[in-house]
Image (cartoon, helix red, strand yellow):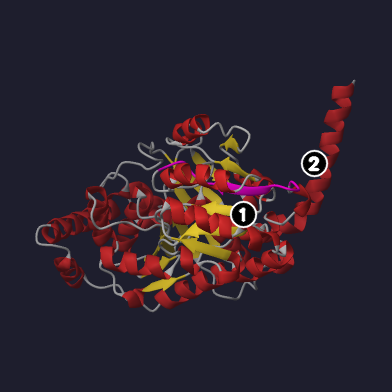
Amino acid sequence: MIEEKDLFKPEEKRYRILMASDFFYPNVGGVENHIFQLSQCLIKRGHKVVVCTHQYKKRKGIRYMTNGLKVYYIPKQPTFRQTTLPTLLNSLPMFRNIMIRERIDIVHGHQATSCICHETITCAREMGIKTVFTDHSLFSFNEIGSFNLHKVSNYSLAEINHVICVSHTGKENTSLRAKIHPIKVSVIPNAIDASQFTPDPSKKTPGEITIVVMSRHTYRKGVDLLIQLIPIVCKKVPNAKFVIGGDGPNRVNIEEMREKYNLHDRIEMLGFVPHELVRNVLTRGDIFLNTSLTEAFCIAIVEAASCGLFVVSTAVGGVPEVLPSHMIKFAKPDAEQLAQAVIDSIGPSQEVDPWLFHSQVKNMYNWDDVAERTEAVYDKIQFDVQQPLVNRIHRYFNCGTWASKAFCFALALQFLFMLILEWLMPANEVDIAPDFPLKQFLKNKDKLNQSWTKSYKVIERANEK
């Protein structure tokens, strides 16, 4: 909980930020956690933050979260992997209304696969609002799905004020596929709340080497590598045990391998593990194993190192940038080499000082630092000037022979549609939403806690009677 003394002075520059993405709570994942934690730290620094996402089953409308974080669960149904269907004009009136009501200065979109992210950025572009985009993933250049995604990024990010990537590898990937000059791309890594990932050596089983795996069981996460290397490690290391958390379409393949090699006592399948319980699983281990085939950052290995585990990982994407060499051992995405890396790491894992690892990770990755660097990006883009329509159209001519013509048509159509909306629903007639009284809330929270405690006691007494 933020304390009143932690807030910045009111005379400092204060932005009104709209975080936009298909991925947010109650769904659980790296992007969802990133948006929430960054928003909380920006609120702590004196800014107003609003989140825009799609509805989750019955959760729709406006909700308030910790410290007055306002969330718009707009009436759009997710279709595939928690993403909504893209629209060109249908959602613009709704996004425009939200931005006017909340007096938004900056729209910050997250994740390239999010349609809400791209739609809010294009809407903000027509309204002259500054835009920032954070890319959390890597995408290939030889798949049809990725090719279509690159074209969408070409269009929505053509006039972006700034892009943030979580690794230098991600920066190169995003610059190439979205055709953005590297000078407009910054690298700000992910972070963790280290207080939630503390070591507990008493949870380890004496005489056993416990190897923890926490990931979705999908091809991209290297589940095929995991299936091949486990029998190799179990054969060469008699006291090795695997604790596997997570779920996914390939989970049945792991279970079949366990049946085939009769490894029921050596492989513990936990299934889906809620994020608040991940630390309890990690503290049981000596080694954390990551078999991903592509990763922009991999927050899981940071959480594991914070809990005092030695990490073994495939050397892919931005993973080699994340941890120093004394915390991690790399191998190529090959089952034999990865199994040997696990075996070679048994000795170093027994010599780890868990609290030293935790202290180092806490200093390297914290959300206050991420928020400060993100705020510096917000300060930088305030000097950007909105270009006239003619100059804007020229930016789309390098997006491909046919795509450039379609993009110019879409740009002109959106421009005209926004003029019609302004005529039908003038901005000065839209009701302005009041800000959450955070300082007043923090002043009165002790009184509120006391009154809530008294209410609970009255209810308990009534229940006893």
Report if residue 292 lies within the magenta region.
Answer: no
SS state under label 1:
strand
Q: Residues within 10 Å of mark 1 (few under 14, many from 20)?
A: many
How far apart marks 1 and 2 lie (CA) works out to 44 Å
First of labels 1, 2 by sequence position: 1
**Residue labelled with disc 2:** 452
What kind of residue is marked 2?
Answer: Trp
Does residue 383 appear left or right of residue 437 in this picture?
left
292 or 149: nearer the viewer:
292
**Residue labelled with disc 1:** 287
Question: Can you give x and y, in whole percent of width and height, for residue 274 in the image?
Answer: 60, 41
What kind of residue is marked 1?
Answer: Ile
**Bounds of the magenta segment:** 205-218
Does residue 444 appear left or right of residue 310 in this picture?
right
Question: Can you give x and y, in whole percent of width and height, for residue 392 in the image?
Answer: 21, 69
Q: Which residue is rendered at x = 40% and y = 74% of the image?
A: 381
Residue reaching furthest to the top = 465
